[in-house]
Amino acid sequence: MRFFKKIATVTVAAAIALPAFASTLPANGRIQFDVFRKGKDIGDLSYEFSGTPEAYSVKISTDIAVKVPLVRFNAYVFKQNSVEKWSGGKLASIQSATNDDGDDHKISQSGKGLLPASLWNDDIVKSRKLLNTIDGRVMNVRVTDLGVQAVPVRGGQLSAHHYRISGDLERDVWYDNQGNLAHVSFTADDGSTVTYVRK
């Protein structure tokens, strides 16, 4: 069953060719999220950063499983592991391997002046074209600024700036005062709401 066809672009997407991108790297080198649907924890998303601001790598791992109640059978599984390599503030290359509920995808390509919207980089809110990290296609998006709001994080709340991405990618994203991803929300194909809550 495909509850989450849209989730296939979760750790995906992004970008427009600008002179340079000023991405903000987290101070501790890692951002982690619990993934929730209908109040249940269905998986994890993590970003790990290594290197220097001039040349760094981002390792992204998504592991999601929606189980059928009682029988504990997996109704949907999404797993993706990708590595972004950045140089001089621009994406140099991206590699990803994805299992989208049994459908396997792999890409390995240069950045081509694009910004991957694996969502961690707050520069995506300036972008109008997005590179899907599953199949490498370019997606067109619009971004709406919805102001500052409080979002849930593990153990409390956090003030963060809310943007709505629409078009070929539909996501609500929030970034904290340091420009780091704080929260994500979107509607899955079955109408349920999926959220990422930062650990």
Image (spheres, grey):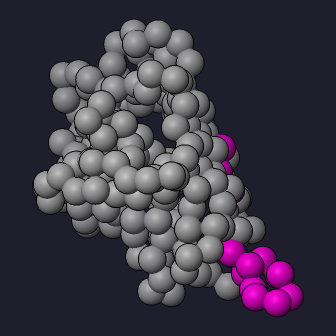
Measured as percent of width and height from the top left, residue 92 is found at 44, 23
Quarter containing the N terminus: bottom right
- Residue 3 among magenta residues: no
Figure quadrant of residue 44: bottom right
Q: Residue at x 52, y 66 (%)?
A: 7
190 versus 118 height, above or below: below
* Residue 108 or residue 190, whichever sits in front: 190
Residue 129 shows in this picture: no
Q: Residue at x 31, y 62 (%)?
A: 172
Q: Residue at x 51, y 23 (%)?
A: 28
* Residue 76 or residue 16, whichever sits in front: 76
Figure quadrant of residue 142: bottom left
Q: Residue at x 52, y 37 (%)?
A: 31
As drawn, is 28 to the left or to the right of 174? right
Range of the magenta residues? 66-81
**What secondary structure do most residues of the magenta stretch adopt?**
strand
